[in-house]
Image: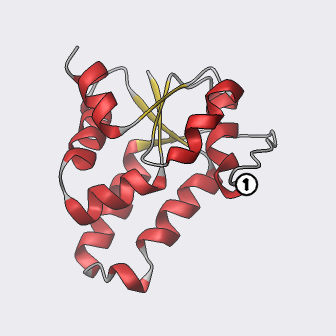
Amino acid sequence: MKVLIDTNVLVSAVLKDKDPETVIAFVVEQPGFEWLVSAEILAEYKAVLGRPKFDLPQIIYAQWMTLLDSATTLFDVNLALEFPRDQSDAKFLACALAANAEYFITGDRDFSQAQKLVNTTILSVSQFKKLIMAA
């Protein structure tokens, strides 16, 4: 199963260490699941986690960088998509379309309006846990 994970879910996993981290671990550990990223998404992950406001200890930052480099599947996205609600989030929708992803896990309510743009099922962390992990 091809899964995209929004940056806000990753940040929550790193900082809060609860359900978002459980979901990411599930996606990484399950045979048949792929955590998809584009080069643009991967760059955003790394830049956001490196922000001074998060003040991550270097060892924690390095562990997450290693996980991102080893556990994600880089997908070449060569399409542009308009997402007027928040154009900076269009990269996730473009990757979902290009890769034909089954799921996009996000905590951003802006994406509720995006469901009509993609065939990918857009879920919150709790919905993913309930519908996919409990199945």
Residue shown at 71% from the left, 28% from the top: 117
What's the colour scheme? secondary structure
Residue placed most toward the observer, 113 or 23 = 113
Residue shown at 32% from the left, 71% from the top: 61
Residue shown at 62% from the left, 38% from the top: 75
| Residue 135, position as x, y percentages in the image | 23, 13
Q: With 69 as the anchor, is 55 left or right in this view?
A: left
Q: Quadrant of residue 88?
A: bottom right
Quarter of the image with the N terminus is top left
| Residue 15, position as x, y percentages in the image | 26, 66
Q: On screen, 60 above or below 86?
A: below
Label 1: few (<14), some or many (≥20) within 10 Å? few
The amino acid on which the numbered mark 1 sits, given as a three-letter code, is Gln
Q: On screen, 56 above or below 44?
A: below
Q: On screen, 68 above or below 22?
A: below
Residue, far top: 135
Q: Is residue 49 visible?
A: yes
Q: Quadrant of residue 55?
A: bottom left
Q: Secondary structure at mark 1?
A: helix
| Residue 68, position as x, y percentages in the image | 40, 53
Q: On screen, 54 above or below 106?
A: below
Residue shown at 49% from the left, 61% from the top: 45
* Residue of label 1: 87
| Residue 80, position as x, y percentages in the image | 81, 43
Residue placed most toward the observer, 81 or 126 = 126
Residue placed most toward the observer, 16 or 2 = 16
Q: Is residue 76 visible?
A: no
Q: Quadrant of residue 125?
A: top left
